[in-house]
């Protein structure tokens, strides 16, 4: 097993606290949104708060990819993200048409975790392919 690059270590140091912050904000916002006395503007601000750490995650991924010295690792991540994007776009498009036919609605906030999951699966498959 190879040692993680400096970019990968920096990414890990950033991602885990950010994901912990996401969980805390998500739980807090879900609790706050149950409150009936909040004005719509306040509710919208509270509803957006959990998305902010996820935007940070997207930024960290981009920074990590551009800081990666190993060209193969950069290409591996880029290809994984392309596969993740393709699968996510295909799945959400198909599901959108299924919703027109009566399938249950899936909230848009599930797209990010779905994309992340498909990207990780693609990364694992590609690592195995190029091993």
Image (cartoon, rainbow, N blue to C red):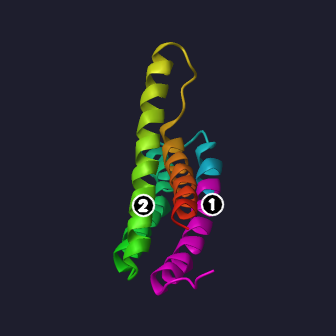
Task: Say if residue 116 shows up in the picture.
Answer: yes
**Mark 2 or mark 1: whose residue is earlier in sequence:** 1
Please report contact status of discs 2 and 1: CB closer than 8 Å, yes or no. no
Point 51% across, 59% down: residue: 126
Residue span colored magenta: 1-27
Q: Which disc, if any, is residue 14?
A: none
Point 58% across, 60% down: residue: 124
Question: Which type of secondary structure does the marked residue at label 2 adopt?
Answer: helix
Quadrant in the rendering for residue 60 = bottom left
State the residue position of label 1: 23
Q: Position of residue 113 (x, y in %)?
A: 55, 50
Label 1 crowding class (10 Å Cα cut-off): few <14, some 14-19, many 20+? some
Q: Position of residue 88 (x, y in %)?
A: 46, 41
Q: Which disc, if any, is residue 55?
A: 2
Instruction: Calculate the distance from the C-alpha at mark 2 to the C-alpha at mark 1.
Output: 14 Å
Question: Which type of secondary structure does the marked residue at label 1 adopt?
Answer: helix
Task: Say if residue 40 shows up in the picture.
Answer: no
Q: Position of residue 5 (x, y in %)?
A: 49, 84
Quadrant in the rendering for residue 3 = bottom right
């Amino acid at each position: 097993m190879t040692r993680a690059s400096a970019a990968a270590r920096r990414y890990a140091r950033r991602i885990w606290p950010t994901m912990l912050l996401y969980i805390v904000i998500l739980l807090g916002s879900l609790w706050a949104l149950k409150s009936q006395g909040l004005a719509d503007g306040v509710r919208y601000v509270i509803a957006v708060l959990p998305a902010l750490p996820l935007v940070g995650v997207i930024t960290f991924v981009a920074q990590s990819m551009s800081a990666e010295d190993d060209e193969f690792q950069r290409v591996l991540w880029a290809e994984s993200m392309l596969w993740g994007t393709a699968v996510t776009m295909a799945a959400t498009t198909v599901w959108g048409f299924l919703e027109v036919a009566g399938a249950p609605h899936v909230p848009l906030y599930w797209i990010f975790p779905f994309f992340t999951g498909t990207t990780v699966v693609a990364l694992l498959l590609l690592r195995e392919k190029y091993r």
